[in-house]
Amino acid sequence: MRCRFYRKIYKKESTGYCVYTYLTEDTGVPQAARSRYFNGDGTVFSAVGVDLPSVEDMEVDLCGKWVKNPKYGLQLSVESYTEIRPQTVEGIKGYLASGMIKGIGPAMAERIVGRFGARTFEVLEKYPDSLLEIKGISQKSLETILRSYQGSNAMRDLAVFLSPFNITPKKIQKIYEEFGNEALETVKSQPFALCRINGFGFLTVDAIAKAIRCSPNDPMRIEGCIRYCMEQENQAGHLCCKKDEFREKVYGQLNYGYVSEAVTPAEISQELYHLVQEQEFFYEKGVFYAARFYGYECGAAKALAGLLDQERPALVNIDFLLDEAQKELGILLSAKQAEGVRKAFASMASIITGGPGTGKTTVERVILYICGKLNVEDVLLVAPTGRASRRMSECTGFPDACTMHSALGLTNEELDGDREEMLEAQMILADEFSMVDMRLGYEFFGHIKKGTRLVLIGDVNQLPSVGPGNVFRELIRCGVIPVTVLDMVFRQKENSRIAMNAHRMQKNDAALEYGTDFVFIPAKGAEKAADVIEKLYLDAAARLGTDQVQVLTPYRKKGEASVNALNERLWNLANPPAGGRREITAGGHVFRDGDKVIHIKNKNGISNGDTGRITGIYLNEDGVEVARLDFSDGRSVEYTGDELDMVEHAYATTVHKSQGSEYPVVILPWLPMFYKMLRRDILYTAVTRAKAQVFLVGDKRSVYRAVHNTESEQRNTMLGDRILQEYRLLTEGRQGRRPEAGNNDDGYEQLAINF
């Protein structure tokens, strides 16, 4: 349908999704889709799609289908479009001045069209040097104009070709940046070249390749699938994958949907061999690694072994300082806590682990006190997240705790740092270390200088890191780092069922004790559970306030007991649209003054997982509607509607998001439908977020299953073994003994794999 852009209704910059209205003279627009408010010539209708054209002076041909939106009625869902270049002088001038072509603004467009008139497009394409006659156009600016003009055409053609595959404008831009004006031809002839571009998964590219009938055993397809399967393993937390299991996974993915065998095991082995030859993959002791994770694991093990194998300073008797610290701080240390403090000063590296309330922070405070008495001035306190580092400062009274990323100079979590300087500290205390993944561990250990004492603190029974690896557990398992296990609970009141049941879970005991502080309420199905949770939440919030009660759930989207569904339920009940509370819309979500929200990105000094309140919705000095968000530590930010995609309602959150937080009351649905998430570490983490009361809603058999399910604790990694191996090589070498040669159990060589 030929039409012209009329008005912007909505556009989400992050995805390119937009809702625009268009003006057409086509009489085929359904009556229900026509705007009732337009009284001019022609018909105005609304269209939805990704990165739709918005140049007023240019005609476009929109192709799509009419769909009915429950709220906004009949709209054209655009599947593809073609720009129809303007033919009139005014139309050409408007097109050039639209901002689509870099280097040409309204004034320059006026001069160009004034010189060449209706022949402007012909000049741009056939005689571009003629533009040098125009005042203000140099050779350099001409090159910019031509690149942009040619690129806009190439990108348009690319967007049209890829429109059936739901490729976002940002990804189309990436393709063009990678392949230039040859992008469309490259995609058509070598679609798996897209796998080289960050953000293009194998499944998306494979769908494109199948649509244009590429050969299923194309080596680039096989390589792309190998990389995809390894990424899947990494996303599941594994650093490596067993040879046979990995090849089977790749084989199944490549042959899925084909009647007969499309790719043979031999062809897969050949590509794996090439990847190992090119050191894109590593093979060792029967497992495959992606190169970067192999480097992280080996590098971290070597660096940590080097820290452990150094001469220890003369042992200082700190017993009198322990006594003094307890008197000055008004505390009484348990035997295990005192042991942890002693190991911190007796060893170059030590570990302190224990559940919530076992006194880890108390140990940190005593260590810091003794550091002060021993004139250890350069002490560094770090944690993996901004939230954890701020909590570390609050609990210890040490104001300068920071994130590991900032200490290391890593400004982007997706990029490896190039910092050469070592961390300047005589002692480093690293809290919440169970949240550290292999990449961060590698960077951290590699930047600790010799002579620095290192104390790692965390709860080994909590959820492992989001990123690949199981660093904290492997450090404990390796057996060469002194470990103190704190097992006496101080934080909760005596005989707390929360503490008692957390301890039982770790002993594989599902006979949990229920009572006033640990309540189980049966509910059959997600909807019934949601009804119960609604009542519990409102009762607790009325007694204590919404900041004191938190709903946690394993799933974000699945069913009525998910984060999204529970937030929708609780939002209007906890913060009803009464009293003229102002609202702001962001990406289809409505936020209201007074809403409890959670930040879902690390940005503007706010950490992923930080919770706060919307304390005002108003027009700023530029006349733009903004929402003010206040956080518990006094930090505030202002966000426009487009920026509010960084926050969500927080009446309910995932268990993963809650890690490192505490709440007086926790309400937790626990149902058979969560079968993939019925794991001990998830249940343990959720329960131990509560300081005073836990409500479990759902099915007791699901609780039993979770207590006995330790699946997530098993991640494929050899970090512990590598640390031990590297440490033995160093110590045996120092003692003048010849280290034993490493034994490759399958007899495989890095560059000659016998498949």
Image (cartoon, rainbow, N blue to C red):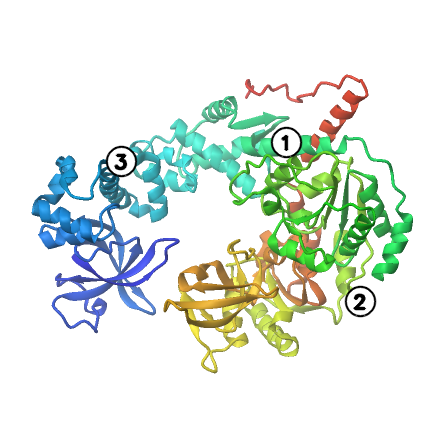
- Residue 235 vertical position relative to residue 91 in the rendered view, above or below: above
The N terminus: image quadrant: bottom left
Q: Looking at the image, is mark 3 or mark 2 earlier in the sequence? A: 3
- Residue 68 vertical position relative to residue 378 in the rendered view, above or below: below
Question: Between 392 and 710, which is closer to the camera in this rendering?
Answer: 392
The answer to whether residue 147 of the structure is visible from this angle is yes
Q: Amino acid at mark 3?
A: Asn
Which disc is residue 493 wearing?
2
Mark 1 and mark 2 in contact (Cβ < 8 Å)? Answer: no
Which disc is residue 181 wearing?
3
In the figure, is residue 519 to the left or right of 96?
A: right
Q: Which residue is mark 1?
A: 299
Q: Amino acid at mark 2?
A: Lys
Mark 2 and mark 3 in contact (Cβ < 8 Å)? Answer: no
Q: Amino acid at mark 1?
A: Gly
Q: Position of residue 278 (x, y in %)?
A: 49, 23
Q: Residue at x 72, y 39 (%)?
A: 475
Q: Secondary structure at mark 2?
A: loop
The answer to whether residue 333 of the structure is visible from this angle is no
Q: Residue at x 58, y 52 (%)?
A: 676
Q: Position of residue 169 (x, y in %)?
A: 33, 48
- Mark 3: few, some, or many residues within 10 Å (few <14, many ≥20)? some
Which disc is residue 328 wearing?
none
Q: Secondary structure at mark 3?
A: helix
Measure the alpha-carbon separation of dots 3 and 1: 41 Å
Measure the alpha-carbon separation of dots 3 and 2: 69 Å
The C terminus: image quadrant: top right
